[in-house]
Amino acid sequence: METPTATMLNVVQLRGDGIYQFLPYVGVTSNYSNQYSYIINDGVLASYDANQAPAMDSFATSGATFNMLATISGYMISYP
């Protein structure tokens, strides 16, 4: 995630099926191209059925535009 100021990011959450999990983020100290970067690498326990899709939401303390790139990975479990 990249923001134009270092204190702009407010909340990041994993959302799906009405469940919200707030995720901790860490600011990266380097500043390139006048953008401040944040990293989230946190294990979460979540399950989704067919036709449900997890999503990432992020909120800022200002109306400034920022970029977010999220990769959600996991594995499939077969129920008996």
Image (spheres, rainbow, N blue to C red):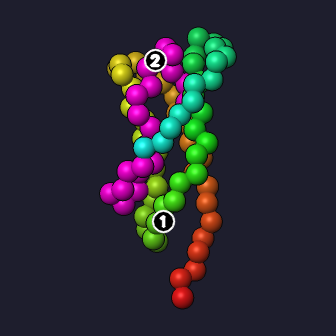
Q: Measured from the top left, where is residue 15 in percent x and y? A: 41, 51
Residue found at the far top of this picture: 34
Q: Measured from the top left, where is residue 30 in percent x and y? A: 67, 16
Quadrant of the frame with the C terminus: bottom right
Can you identify the residue that label 1 sits on? 47
For residue 59, what is the image quadrant? top left
Residue found at the far bottom of this picture: 80
Indicate left or right for 43 with 60 as reference. Answer: right
**Number of residue marks:** 2
Q: Amino acid at mark 1?
A: Ser
Can you identify the residue that label 2 sits on? 7
Q: Measured from the top left, where is residue 10 in percent x and y? A: 40, 28
Indicate left or right for 60 with 78 as reference. Answer: left
Along the line of sight, the residue nearer the viewer: 18 or 43:
43
Segment colored magenta: 1-21
Q: Amino acid at mark 2?
A: Thr
Q: What residue is drawn where x is 58% and y is 51%?
A: 43
Q: Secondary structure under badge 2?
A: loop
Q: Secondary structure under badge 1?
A: loop
